[in-house]
Image (tube, rainbow, N blue to C red):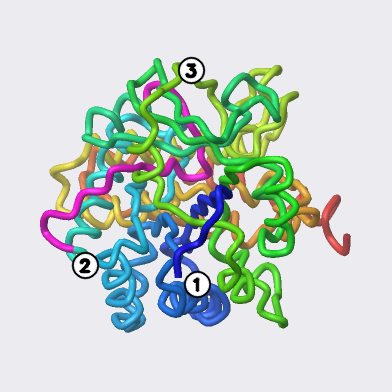
Amino acid sequence: MKHQTDNLWINFLHLYQPANTDAYHIQEAIDKSYARLVRALEEHPQIKFTLNISGCLILRLEELGYFDFIKRLKKLIESQQLEITGTAAYHALLPLVDETEVARQIKENEVILKKHFGTNFKPNGFFFPEMAYSPPVAKIVKKMGYKWIIVDEILFNGKLGQVNFNDVYLDTNSGLKVVFRGRHFSGTYVPDNLAKFFAKDKTVITATDGELYGLRHEDPTGELEKLLKRNFFTTQLISDFIAERKKIIKVKLLNGNWESTQRELKNQEPYALWQKKGNKIQAAIWDLADLAQAISHKNYKDVNYNWSRWHLVRGLASCTFWWASGRDFSDNFGPRAWSPDEIERGLNEFIRSIRSLHNQTTSRTKIKAEKMYLHVQRLIWEKHWRYYWQK
């Protein structure tokens, strides 16, 4: 069925679970959200979504035997209902890790995608984990052959409500084409509000975690499925949306992410959720993370280098630092971002990365790292028992 309407919904979905998360978390996300989204597309062939699935999640799906789910994704790609973007394989916050790590995680993600979606598979678009943008990272993305990115509207000029969502933009920092997601649109359960959004805008661009559809927001009456049956809008892949726009508007994107506030950008804290001024725990974790990156990259010929890197990339996942922020996300279908256990999960990966190295010359660095590790642990648990416990 072809929709006869000028209303256009661009829906971007982000599928990610940490590489070191417990298996039941992945199973829950599949059962409640991911499988539902795939089934919804299969049952409504006129609907098109753009999707990012992190390489580390695909690796866990392999491990847990979800090959049929991956094949269903491939079939939707082949039928042009789904478009997959590139990203960093282990969901590192790219502006805050070294450039060698940025390129390696992007390349590894490409290798994983090609394994399952075809040897010539190359996405046009790129998703920065947490939509965390910086010009140096964007230049790397451009150099690696990507054509467009999706970022939050606040990166247009530091304010919300300034973007025309009918337009496509060009980032003068990098040469990448840009599509902006609507912050207000994306901060709701979209099926409940899409008709209202179209009363103000003919083009609505949403970008959310895939877990929104079932895991974070229960939908017992199937509002998503009801929405997809209605005929007051059309959907489109982002690459097709961009290709149809002949006029491209130049913009110099600001550093920031999809949770950035106007105050944070004004205070030059573009990644405050993961590296906030005054957050001693985050600062101490980053010190250990930087040490782990430096010594692991330096010892690339070490007999245990692969194990060192295996742990390093898992520690660098944005979750390690997110769970130390303490921010309350209850107004956006999420929890309070505080969990000593989740922080320690990442912290343990950093120390194991350093411990794994065999080279005897690393002994002094290892002792230094052990002291840093114990210091962070003390900070975490003191903060927990004194402030967050039983709240």
The kind of residue tagged 3 is Val
Residue 116 - label: 2
**Quick one: label 1, few (<14), some, or many (20+) residues within 10 Å?**
many
Q: CA distance from mark 3 to mark 1?
A: 33 Å
The residue drawn where x is 61% and y is 33% is 275
The residue drawn where x is 32% and y is 77% is 72
Residue 251 - label: 3
Label 3–label 1 contact, CB within 8 A: no
Q: Under tag 1, what secondary structure?
A: helix
Query: Is-magenta flag for residue 363?
Result: no
Q: CA distance from mark 2 to mark 1?
A: 19 Å
The residue sitting at the right extreme is 391
Q: Percent position (x, y) of residue 272?
A: 65, 33
Q: Quadrant of residue 333?
A: bottom right
Residue 25 - label: none
Q: Percent position (x, y) of residue 360?
A: 23, 43
Residue range (magenta): 118-136
Q: CA distance from mark 3 to mark 2?
A: 35 Å
Label 2–label 1 contact, CB within 8 A: no
